[in-house]
Image: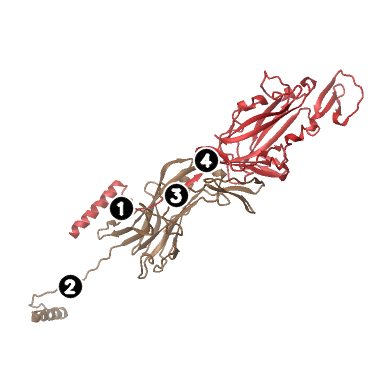
Chain colours: A red, B brown
Amino acid sequence: MMQNTRLSRSGRCAAAIALTTGLLPCAGALNIDRPSFEVPGLVIVWAVDDADPNAGVKVVDFMAEAPDGTLTDLIPEDGRTLLTGTLDPTNEFAAGPDTPIGRIRLRDLDDDTTTIVDPSQGTVFTAFDPENMELNHYREDVNSSTAIYSSQFGIASNTGFAIRATVGEEIATGDFNMNSIKALVAVHSSANINGTMIGQHSTTSTGHLNPRVTWIRLSYLGEVTPFQIQRATATAPGTILDQSILFNPRYLLTNSDASMPFHTGEAHARSLDLSLGSGEVSATVTYTIYAL
Amino acid sequence: MLFRRHLGVTSSFIAALASVPHAAHATNVDRPHFQVDPVVILWAADDSDGTAPVVVDFIVEDSSGVETDLIAANGRTLLTGSLTATPDATNAVQRGTEWQVRQIPGNTLATIDTKSPAAFSAFDMADNVYAVAPDSHHTSAMFAASNTPFSIRATASVLGTPTNFSLADIAFDSSVSSGGNHGGLSFGASTSNPSITRANSGQKLSEFTGEGLDVFVASEATAATPGSIAQQSVRLQVGYVFETDLIGAFDLADGYGEIQAEVTYTAYVP
């Protein structure tokens, strides 16, 4: 009887060996462990708090992806963009238009001399010969006659995401409306802002947004978005700043010819001259981030 | 009858001494024979219902070298430091869903449970702020008592359909404890710190597929002195870690996704 039992066990083991490679142990003992890991998609946005813009740079959006793919922002506060090249906040709407743009540059093309006129200061100047005299608006801060407003905010993620722009008209008087502002949006994978290094461990994937847009009038901006970043910005371990990219929208004042929604380059708008007419225009552009 | 027995014993005694054949044919043969088969006992939790602690494997190697586990039920590992079973396949704990924003050096600025998200306030940004998922470790334990050297082989496979991650993203780690208290249950008082070789730390679960790898090789019995099974047991602890970065946690650069692995530990007498 004992002999039979031994034969029976031997038979089971042989079967087990036959089913396997012959190298596995033939004991049937099994202890099972089931390690499980899940990492949600996250998108982190930093800029300044719109309600308290002078409190410094803050993380203003912390979006986590739910199982259904939606991104939920766990920070209720709204953010506000930074002035490009700085960690300072952009002006809020109530502050009015950028005052430097209101200056006028008179440039004598004969002898290449210029006169800066600031209407707000009641500058008085002498009569001049209109021939070969060019008149531009002038921004002393950037030494440019182009009325460009440029801002940025940082994004760090472990997943691809999309950015939708929504345009709201705040002021449009005189000759200006939402067609009078053109936007160009770019992304940068690295920057040095006054010694603060951004993006040392980040990528913008293809190096640009998809779709690529050239200067586009604000009235069309919402139609061409969302912009898509196809992959995570973070490429290597590091801080949030290391893993961030910069989203950089720029806006310029131009004519309001809606028949040409797109332009390439900026040359067409370099001269902010009398032909643009007069008036005031202001918009709110809201960038909303969501999962691809 | 008594005489014959006496005669027989005497005759044998004389023959043995003098090597002189004797005419008596009576023999009484005694052959004391003992056999103790190699036994390996594993205890952890019952995989079918999570009951713990229970002996789930009782492996005997018979004289022909065949090993048999006399307990048909499969076992399941225990949560480290407790007598609670690890989650089963339908209720697996998912690590990596809690994130922290840390300032290093400094404090934790925010803790975010993405499974039960709650709103929090904007927080300061600086060049020493990190976003990490600190809970990227899964550890568990089982216990072994034996009167023989034994080995435990691990084989790994993927459960379900992973997203973005693979077994190559999970590193294996292990440790052995020959005495202590686990969830209120003392173990190891009757062991003598047996020599147990462990798998190399950091090996990826992708190396555990197919035939698997021996992750524990005990070159001697665990039991050194008389005692209960728990007293003669050693604790075999295993751990699984996502790829870690310089600050020892999972961060944005590791991406997002999901994976559930099944690792089966099979004990045998080599």
Q: Amino acid under label 4? A: Ala
Above or below, A78 against A219 in this view is below
Tell me how far mark 2 sits from mark 4, CA to CA.
Answer: 77 Å
Identify the chain of the residue marked 1, using the numbered disc in the image: A
Residue drawn 92% across the image and 22% down it: A127
**SS at mark 1 in the image:** loop
**SS at mark 2 in the image:** loop
Q: B134 or B31, which lies in front?
A: B134
Q: Position of residue A61 (x, y in %)?
A: 62, 41
Of callouts 3 and 4, the N-terminal one: 3
Q: Position of residue A153 (x, y in %)?
A: 66, 38
Q: Are marks 1 and 3 in contact (CB under 8 Å)?
A: no
Identify the chain of the residue marked 2, using the numbered disc in the image: B
The answer to whether residue B11 is left or right of residue B228 is left
Q: A271 or A22, which lies in front?
A: A271
Tell me how far mark 1 sits from mark 4, CA to CA.
Answer: 44 Å
Q: B217 or B263, which lies in front?
A: B263
